[in-house]
Amino acid sequence: MLTHSSFLQANSEAYEWMVEKIHTIDRRIEPETVLRQIVAAARFAAVFHPGRFADGTLENLALDIGAELDEIPTEIQINGLSNLHKQNRRRVLHVATEVLGVGGHTRMLYHWVCNDYNSCHSLVLVNQRDITAIPNWLSEAIQSSGGELVIFPAESELCQKARWLRATAKRIADLVVLHHCPFDVVPTVAFAIRECPPIAILNHADHLFWLGSSVADIVINLRTAGSKHTAECRFIENNTVIPIPLAESTKQMSRKQARQMLGIEEDQCMLLSVGRGEKYRPCGAYDFVATANKILDHQTIAHLYVVGETAAGIGPYLNRKLHNRLHFMGSIENPSLYLMAADVYLESFPFGSNTALLEAALCGLPVVPAYAPLFPLLVANNDSLHDILSNPLNEEEYIDRVDMLIRDSNHRTEFGEMLRNRLLLDHTTDGWLRRLAKMYEETDFLMHSPKPIPIASFSLTNADIGLSLWHIMANGKSSFTGIPENLLNAVLCHTSFVAKEVGNYTAARRNAWLAVRQDPLAWSPWRLLGITTMGKTGRSLRQLLSHAKD
C-alpha cells in the first residue's frame, strides 16, 4: 500500500544500494576512493533520512582504514604547529569541519571557549573552504585562551588530513571535542586507534545521521531528548547533557534606539524569527509563511521580521504571496540589533532553531515555540524551560499564543523575564561551568577506546517518516513542494531523484518513466527522465556549468 512511508523506504533503498557499491571497492588498494564514497553516502543519509542515524555497515569501513592509516603513504608534516606543553591547565582541542560567521554552531563553540577560561582551547578546521569566513572574534578567543588555530588545506586528501589530525591531537590535546559536520569522515579515520586522547562528540546535529559513533568515548548532548536518542539510535552508551553555552546579554542600547537604527516605528509590534532559509520551507500542513500571513491579517499593528532568509530565497517554495508586513531580511552575522528592538520571538517551523530561540529568551523576549513537530528533535526543546515553555499542539494554538503576546504588553515583559532568569541559571557563567566541570571530572579519566558499531536496521516509526518528509521538502532539489495530491507520482519522482543522487541511473530512469506514464502532462517527471537518461555525462555537464557560474 502506498503511504507517506514510501518516501522513507525509497531513501533507504538508495542508501543501501550506495553502501553495497562501496563494499565492492578494495579499501587496501583504494583507501581514498572508499573514504570519498563514505562521505558521499553519509551526506546522502544526512540529507535524505534513510531510517538510520548511524550504521556500522558504512562507518566501520572508515574505522578499518583508520586502523591501517600508518601504512598508507602520506606527508605527515604540517607547518606552523608547536607543542602546547602540559601545564596546570587542561588542553582542549576542538575539531570542526568548518566555521561560519552566521549560525548557532560557531557561536556555541565561541561561548564554550570564552566561558571555560580555566582551560587552554585550540581549534582544528578540517575543511575550511573559505578562510575569510572565519570570524575574527573566534580566532581572538582561541588565541586569548593560549591555544592555536590550525587550518588544514581544504584540497588535501582525506587520509592526509586524518594523519595530521591524529598527530595534532597527540601533540596538543588532553581532550578532543568533535564539532564536525555529519558526513565528515576524517575524525573517524584519525581516531581509529587507541593511542589518542579521549574523544567527545558535541551532538549539535542530533536530528541527523552522522559519522563518529565508533570513536566516541562520550557524547555531549545539548538536551535530554538528544541523549536518549543517542543511546537508542547511535550505539553510544556513555552520554552526558550540557546546556548550550550562551553569553549573558548586556543591552548596549534601548529598544527605542535599536528601532531608530533599523528604521522601525516605535508603535509597531515587532515579531522576530531567526534561522537558516531551509527552516522556513513548507512541508505539507507546516507552512510558516501561511501561518505568519494569518497572524498579520488580524493583528494590524504587527510586522514580522525573518533574519536568515530572503524573499527571493523562500519564494520558489511558496504557493502564496508574502504578506506586505512580512519582511525577510537575509543573512545577518550579528542579529543582536533585531533582538534588542523586538517584542516577541517566533520559532521557525517545520525546522526550529534551538540556539536562536535561547538567545532571544536570554535577551528577555517572550518566545512562541514551533507547534506539533514532524520529528521531536527538529525543534527547540530545552531542559531548563520544559515546564514553562511547551510546544503548541497545533497551528491554532500557535497563533493564539502570538495573539495574546501582541495584545498584552505586561504579559510579554513578565514571560520574557521568566524565561531569561531560567536560562541565566544553566546556560551562562557559573551555572554552565558547574555542568562543564562535572563532565571534565569524567573525561579526565577516560581512556580512548574505538570499536566497530553494529549494523543498523531500517526503522519505520512515525518519527522517522516525519523526518523523511521534512527532508524531501527542505532539500531544495525535489520535484514538488508540500505533500501533493498525486501521491503515486510524487513517490515515483522522489524514488527516481534519490536513485539519481546515489548514481543508480537504471533505477532512476525506470521510476522516472513510470512517473511520466502515470502523469504525462506533468513537467517534473519529464525533466527527471531527461536528466536520468543522460546519466553520469549529464551530471558532469551540470557540475561544469555550475562551476562556470561561480
Image: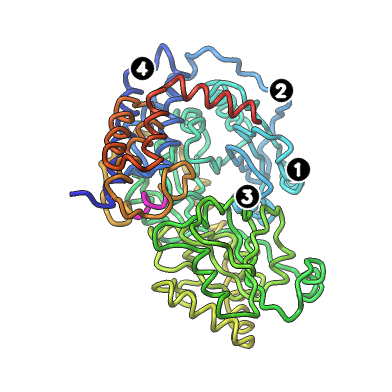
Q: Can you give x and y, in whole percent of width and height, for residue 234 in the image?
A: 36, 45
Q: Residue at x 38, y 27 (%)?
A: 532
207 and 62: which is toward the camera: 207
Q: Which residue is mark 4?
A: 25
The reply to whether residue 104 is in sight is: yes
> What span is in magenta?
466-471
According to the image, label 2 marks what residue?
Answer: 79
Q: Is 249 in front, or is 478?
A: 478
From the image, tell me which residue sits under label 1.
143
Query: Amino acid type of disc 1?
Result: Gln
Instruction: Give the amino acid at mark 3.
Output: Leu
Residue 365 vertical position relative to residue 212 in the rendered view, above or below = below
In three-dimensional space, the C-alpha distance between marks 2 and 4, rounded to whole angstroms, equals 33 Å
Q: Position of residue 41 (x, y in %)?
A: 40, 32
Helix, strand or loop at label 4? It is loop
Q: Amino acid at mark 4?
A: Ile
